[in-house]
Amino acid sequence: MPIKLRDTDIAVLNALLKDGRKSLRQISYETGISTPTVKNRFNRLVNLGVIKSISPILDLSKMVDYAHGGKSKNDRSTYITNIRTEYEQQHQQLSSRKKQHRKDFDIEIDKRMALNIKCDYCKTPLAGKIYLLKFANFERFFCCNPCKVAYKKKYSGRINAMSKTHSEIKC
């Protein structure tokens, strides 16, 4: 059974679809949701896999050779031109494969949509009660407590290392 999106999830996703560069504070201001709640919902959507990445689309035509003040008199400017061309070709291939360029997002998330989530251990679709494991900045979702325990046992070294690194960074 799919998991319903909360109103806060819908608001955060729609704000990001309009402009993925918005800060959490700006999303909070626009939606009327507190900044900590926006952050929590954003992190949960990332952990659920709904938000795959926040990645830039670069305009390399703005790049120049700093060492020569942007003048195109030598091999260095040819090098930059080649980088621009290669990036644009790769970006076009990626856009044509995904059929999704930032300007092509003409959708809006609403309450009719739901999430199909699977257990992070046994891959069973989640329905009803969800068992949650939080560590570092991650959340993992399970269909039952035995799956949660088995996951913790299987990945205990990785979980401990990530939790330790995360606590060191926070201090």
Image (cartoon, helix red, strand yellow):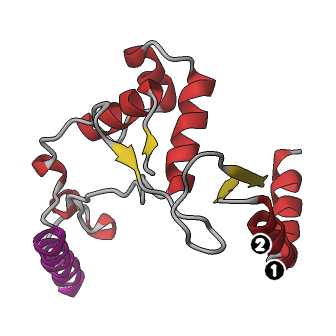
Q: Residues within 10 Å of mark 1 (few under 14, many from 20)?
A: few
**Residue picked out by circle 2:** 151
* Extreme residue in the bottom direction: 75
What label does residue 18 carry, if any?
none
Please determine whether, in this image, residue 26 is positioned above or below residue 84.
above
Query: Callout 2, which amino acid?
Result: Tyr
Coordinates of residue 152 in the picture (x, y in percent): 83, 69
> At 49% across and 58% down in the image, what residue appears?
117
The magenta span reads 75-98
Relative to 34, 101 lies left or right: left
Query: Considering the image in quadrants, where does the C terminus appear?
Result: top right
Residue 121 in magenta stretch: no
Query: Callout 1, which amino acid?
Result: Lys
> At 22% across and 84% down in the image, what residue appears?
79
Res. 65 image quadrant: bottom left
Disc 1 + disc 2, Cβ < 8 Å: yes
Res. 97 image quadrant: bottom left
> At 24% across and 35% down in the image, what residue appears?
18
**Residue picked out by circle 1:** 154
Please determine whether, in this image, residue 97 is positioned above or below residue 59.
below
SS type, badge 2: helix
Please determine whether, in this image, residue 100 is positioned above or below residue 112.
below
Relative to 23, 87 lies left or right: left
Relative to 83, 130 lies left or right: right
For the question of whether residue 56 can be seen, the reply is yes
Coordinates of residue 133 in the picture (x, y in percent): 76, 55
For the question of whether residue 73 can be seen, the reply is no
Q: Residues within 10 Å of mark 2 (few under 14, many from 20)?
A: some
